[in-house]
Image: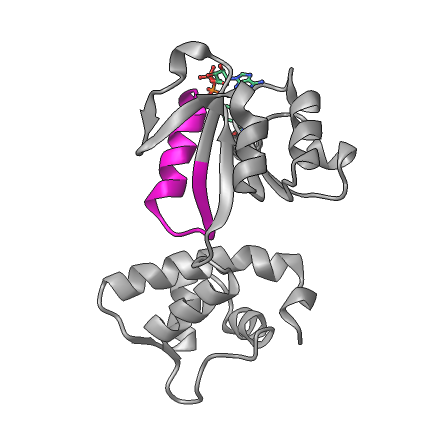
Amino acid sequence: MKESNISISVIKRLPRYYRFLENLKNNGIARISSNELSERMGLTASQIRHDFNCFGGFGQQGYGYNVPELHAKIGEILCVNREQKTILIGAGNLGKAVANKIMQRQSGFKLIGIFDKNEAMSGTMIHGLPVRHVDYLENFCIDNSPVCAVICIPSNDMKELTDLLCRLGIKSFWNFSNYDIAMVHPEVLVENVHLTDSLMTLSFLTSSKED
Ligand code: NAI
């Protein structure tokens, strides 16, 4: 099966496998049986086999999984070693935290520019990168050709900003704002992140358990 045909639900489980295997690897565990992996992850062994078979299967009968190899293979599938040029808009509380996260570990993206409309922030450094005024965004994109944008600003200016970024060649967005980029620009990839969605789900589950 071609990797592009893999269902999105399988793809969405891969980062968890990756994280889990990284932990095992860092603890010096070189090999794990499919049963043990399933028990530790709270998944069925057949679910794990099904997921890995989508990529050709990694285990060996009677041996289980080679942890460093499987970790590397899943990293390869997730393209964590790529360095897709990325910019971040909005260097406030969230923007700083997200920038640090992107810089700290391999995720497939390389932060090359940070922009904010607050002039007082211009020239301040985040993880070695200067914050630039958003007026420089267009020229920066023309000169550096970023392909991904991380959005950490309120929704007010988002229409104008996303129109500009799409025109400048941005192909994917990691969107923390409430603005629905995909509705306006179906041609780009958008991964929305809303921490409060998760919190509200927890609120519902907690309340229904109490009832
Ligand atoms: P903040 O006020 O600390 O930072 C926002 C920054 O964006 C400011 O530095 C501001 O100057 C800048 N900004 C605003 N409009 C801009 C524009 N058009 N171009 C460039 N820079 C611009 O706010 P915080 O806490 O960092 O949150 C930012 C946004 O992210 C808020 O709208 C908030 O609702 C949202 N948010 C979303 C979360 C999520 O899970 N999706 C979690 C936390 C915040």
Which residue is located at x 54 percent, y 38 percent? 143
- The picture quadrant where one finds residue 145 is top right
Which one is in front, 117 or 184?
117
> Which picture quadrant has residue 119?
top left
**Extreme-left residue of the structure:** 28
Q: Residue at x 66, y 73 (%)?
A: 2
How far from the left and from the top, in percent, is residue 182?
72, 37
Q: Is residue 138 above or below residue 49?
A: above
Q: Quadrant of the C terminus?
A: top right
Lateral position of residue 58 relative to residue 149, left or right: left
* Residue 58 visible, this angle: yes
Whether residue 100 appears in magenta in the rendering, the answer is yes
**Can residue 208 be seen in this snapshot?**
no
Asked whether residue 172 is drawn in magenta, I would say no
Q: Looking at the image, which residue is at 36% across and 20% down?
A: 123
Residue under the point 38% across and 30% down: 97
Residues rendered magenta in the picture: 91-112
